[in-house]
Image (cartoon, helix red, strand yellow):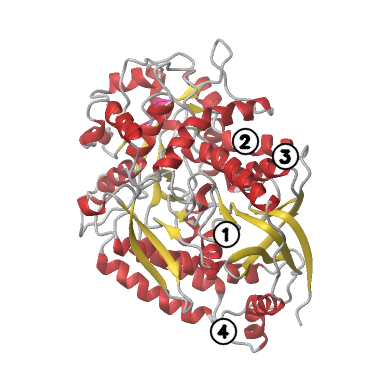
Amino acid sequence: MAQYETIQHDVLVIGAGGAGLRGAIEAAGRGVSVGVISKSLLGKAHTVMAEGGVAAALSNVDDRDNWKVHFADTMRGGQYVNNWRMAELHAKEAPDRVRELEAWGAVFDRTPDGRILQRNFGGHRYARLAHVGDRTGLEMIRTLQDHATFERMSFYTEFTIVSLLKEGNRVVGAIGYQREKGLFFVFQAKAVVLATGGLGRAYKITSNSWEGTGDGFALALDAGAELRDVEFVQFHPTGMIWPPSVAGLLVTEGVRGEGGVLRNRLGRRFMFDDIPALYKNQTADTEEEGWRYTVGDKNARRPPELVTRDHVARCIMREVREGRGSPHGGVFLDIAWIKEKIPNAEKHIRAKLPSMYDQFLKLADLDITKEPMEVGPTTHYSMGGVRVDGDSQMSSLPGLFAAGECAAGLHGANRLGGNSLSDLLVFGKRAGEYAARFALETSLGRVSESAVNENIRQALAPFENGAKGRGESPYQLQAELQEMMQELVGIVRTENEMVRALDGIQKLKERSRSLHVEGNRMYNVGWHTAVDVGNLLTVSEAICRAALERRESRGAHYRIDYPDKSESLAKVNTTLHKGEDGAISVRLEPIKEMPAELKQIIEEMK
């Protein structure tokens, strides 16, 4: 019999980033017992890395903005495969969530008359991103954590969840272990909220922190919930290129929002070469027009660097492939040029982009107020995730909710910058609200002791292999998977390469059965990596299968063998399910018809 401790809560939140904390605050405020599990230390969630701002139609900088414009921008950016109900709720509720955050103590940058300042960002028609310099995510986590101390909830830091527990078809808890000591815990709960973030660590070059191993995706799929649209993986166009030790580290879109331009090694501003048709009527035709837009003239048009991220990323890769890239395989992002346009530009850059200034100065020995940055695409965000109801955020399994990056729907085929932080607030709040409602209407379920013992046995299997002195290194398998996904299922995809990747994933899955770790369970990083590898293999297979099924190019999903959009796939989502035999199946599911009033909004905004 395995040794473990049992803890009970009404609502269990797995993840302590923006979505998890906002959900926990909402649930606790409704009078239920809440437990919050964090994979790392509290305050270290990947949300702190979000830099540019939180998108909300506050209309503080441009009074033409409103929820309808934000809704239309989000749908257009997502190529209309979004969950339109989530896009509607998000656009309507984001302003209240931002003002709420301000009331809780968030210190935003200000307009001259004292309102929350908003900046331009890719894909947004008007200046819409409320920000705190380039440290918005950090301020959000600080504020949410501070407010959470006024609510009654329990925190369990540095825990890894290995499986969800079920009674019949209902989720009744989770099992995990304390990373420091290796002790197992069973968390019984009436409702479980997944808020575990993304899956960027399936790729070699990523902006994601070490926690982004697709845990929520894999936990939900293994439990019998459905995933949706996981083929849509966003590659942020600007990550650090040099030195290699920081390759992939995010360079915020806020640099371009403040006037930064992209140039190839010849010094040409290449984004003017390929402006998407959707943006022809609102994108600046000259550098001068683009500059006027970035300094706040609402009658000017957006610079071409601020079209959607998928398009910018592909344009950068075009320059690299055609021999016009930077010395280390990227392009140049230049913010220093604004010295030609405004006085005290160096002070302005340091004030607006303090993290970027420090990041390049300390990690690349480069002063961004004087020299251009070398940047290139980096795996950044998953638009797909757990399939949820648009209003309640409940998955296809009763008692299981999801919010934030691990939940699908809002962003469709491509996320607009800044929508991720407002997503966390809007749907974190909704997940917490509906999880609390569910918990108040039900009782604790029964946890199967045999299921607990089996999960613990599987989690400890690498130690048995280690004791026998043979097996596979979890580090080696992880590295091989990341290399393969980067090469074969990256920004540009083909059927042959993805079939090769699937074959490679199956071979790695076989090898993963003999993963081995040495030593004991205390402070054992090799063991943690072995657990992560299992999740990464699951999400990598899901990405491949969904991407093979979508035979077209749409948003962040670009296939050379199917370079155009398919009319037959324009109104379908990919939905994934894992059968009892462990096989992942994909079906194409029609998108529910949009109400006439929302269709009219989109037509008007065109």
For disc 4, the neighbor class at 10 Å (few under 14, some 14 to 19, many from 20) is some
- Residue at the spot of label 3: 29
Measured as percent of width and height from the top left, residue 289 is found at 29, 19
Please provide the residue range marked out in magenta. 258-262
Which image quadrant is residue 462 in?
Answer: bottom right
State the SS at label 4.
loop
User: Is residue 158 shown above or below 293?
Assistant: below
- Residue at the spot of label 1: 398
Q: Which mark is residue 589?
A: none
As measured in the structure, the alpha-carbon distance from the residue carrying label 3 to the one carrying label 2 is 19 Å
State the SS at label 2.
helix
Q: Is residue 305 magenta?
A: no
Residue that lies at the very extreme toward the front in this rendered image: 441
For disc 2, the neighbor class at 10 Å (few under 14, some 14 to 19, many from 20) is many
Amino acid bearing label 1:
Pro
- Residue at the spot of label 2: 140
As measured in the structure, the alpha-carbon distance from the residue carrying label 1 to the one carrying label 4 is 39 Å
Residue 275 appears in view:
no
Q: Quadrant of the C terminus?
A: top left
Identify the mark nearer the N-term, 4 or 3: 3
Dots 3, 2 in contact, CB < 8 A? no
- Residue at the spot of label 4: 471
Mark 1 vs mark 4: in front:
1
As measured in the structure, the alpha-carbon distance from the residue carrying label 4 to the one carrying label 2 is 43 Å
Amino acid bearing label 3:
Gly
Amino acid bearing label 4:
Gly
State the SS at label 3.
helix
Measured as percent of width and height from the top left, residue 59 is found at 47, 19
Identify the mark nearer the N-term, 3 or 2: 3
The one of 49 and 592 positioned closer to us in this rendering: 592
